[in-house]
Image (cartoon, helix red, strand yellow):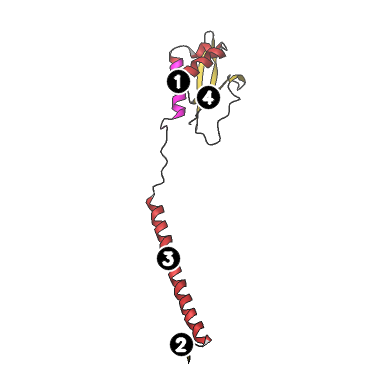
């Protein structure tokens, strides 16, 4: 240490020691602040509840089955399917289902051959929940030993 004109001059080695101590103290303060921020963020994240409520709690498969069952009980489904009345079947299903429920339908005979399809070019979005129904119709009029399989797919568009 040197004293000149009432001013104390420190040797460069002593300055380095003080600067090192200050650096260490500043580093510890920065670490403490960073850890405090991380702890507060973790607490905030765990307090947030991540839940996804279903917008529509109903089951699309059940809706499709109930629609086809109601049409069959009313006596309208068999004539439409066996007589290939696709336009009327389309209109009835459009009116029976909600506007935001999209569907596609195919009908096969007892050998598995596709008889007709309605809206089969429609494809549900990849993230859509799809309800699927396979409904069996046994015999109509004089054709009592044959059956038809109605394959109905439904999905809901939200937005």
Q: CA distance from mark 4 to mark 1?
A: 12 Å
Q: Earlier in the sequence, mark 4 or mark 3?
A: 3
| Residue highlighted by disc 2 | 7
User: Label 3: few (<14), some or many (≥20) within 10 Å?
Assistant: few
Residue 22 numbered mark, or none: none
Nearer the viewer's eye, disc 2 or disc 3? 2
Q: Earlier in the sequence, mark 4 or mark 2?
A: 2
Q: Quadrant of residue 34?
A: bottom left
Picture layout, residue 80 above or below residue 58: above
Residue 103 numbered mark, or none: 4
| Residue highlighted by disc 1 | 67
Whether residue 6 is in magenta: the answer is no
Q: Quadrant of residue 26?
A: bottom left
**x, y (%) of residue 62?**
44, 27
State the residue at coordinates (44%, 19%). Answer: 69
Picture layout, residue 66 above or below residue 55: above
Q: Earlier in the sequence, mark 3 or mark 1?
A: 3
Secondary structure state at the residue bearing disc 1: helix
Nearer the viewer's eye, disc 1 or disc 2? 2
Between 34 and 62, the one nearer to me in the picture: 34
Residue 12 visible here: yes
**x, y (%) of residue 98?**
45, 23
Q: CA distance from mark 3 to mark 1?
A: 63 Å
Q: Is there a contact, CB below 8 Å, between mark 2 and mark 3?
A: no
State the residue at coordinates (45%, 68%). Answer: 31
């Amino acid at each position: 240490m040197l004293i000149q004109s009432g001013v104390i001059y420190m040797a460069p080695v002593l300055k380095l020691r003080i600067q090192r101590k200050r650096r260490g103290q500043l580093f510890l303060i920065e670490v403490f602040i960073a850890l405090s921020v991380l702890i507060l963020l973790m607490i905030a994240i765990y307090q947030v509840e991540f839940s996804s409520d279903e917008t529509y709690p109903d089951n699309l498969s059940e809706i499709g089955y109930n629609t086809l069952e109601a049409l069959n009980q009313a006596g309208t489904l068999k004539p439409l399917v066996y007589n290939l009345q696709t336009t009327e079947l389309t209109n009835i299903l459009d009116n029976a289902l909600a506007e935001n429920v999209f569907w596609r339908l195919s009908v096969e005979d007892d050998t598995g051959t596709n008889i007709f399809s309605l809206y089969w070019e429609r494809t549900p979005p990849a993230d859509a929940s799809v309800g699927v129904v396979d409904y069996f119709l046994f015999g109509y009029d004089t054709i009592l030993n044959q059956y038809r399989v109605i394959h109905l797919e439904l999905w809901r568009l939200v937005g």
